[in-house]
Amino acid sequence: MAKFITIGYGDEAGYQRTAEPVRAAAHAQDARLRDSGALIGIAGPPVQVRNHDDAGVQVTQGAFLRSDLPIAGFAVIDAKDLQEAIAQVSKSPCAVAQGVVDVWPLQEMP
């Protein structure tokens, strides 16, 4: 199995526009992923960390990454390939509630 990092983007307005049965099914999909061993979490407030040339750590509040929608959460999932990973997250809350999910293959460092 390969590992994939997923980043879910979405906002409350889009979530509320989505029918309750669709949201409930999406949360059930997240529960199935968690039960199968996926690491799933809601995004907290980010900080940026820099230590250029190992000359001192600088921490800045806020995200470096910018998007039209806020980051709602992250997951690390196992799938046999990219297509299976896509299928797993295509029914997740961000995917169905007017948001979007990035799927990033995780390549382990040698």
Image (tube, rainbow, N blue to C red):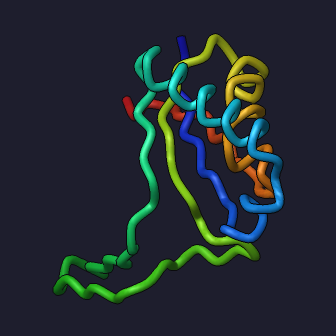
Rendered residue at 63%/41% (across/down): 104
Along the line of sight, the residue nearer the viewer: 105 or 5: 5
In the visual, does 109 lie left or right of 95?
A: left
x, y (%) of residue 58?
Answer: 25, 87
Along the line of sight, the residue nearer the viewer: 13 or 55: 13
x, y (%) of residue 27?
Answer: 60, 36
Where 67 sits versus 109, above or below?
below
* Callout count: 0
Where 54 sits versus 109, above or below?
below
In the visual, does 101 lie left or right of 43?
A: right
Rendered residue at 27%/85% (across/down): 59
Along the line of sight, the residue nearer the viewer: 108 or 40: 40
Rendered residue at 32%/79% (across/down): 50
State which quadrant residue 20 falls in: top right
Where 74 sits versus 2, above or below?
below
Quarter occupied by the C terminus? top left
x, y (%) of residue 92?
Answer: 68, 37
In the visual, does 2 lie left or right of 43?
A: right
Q: Which residue lies furthest to the left in this view?
A: 56
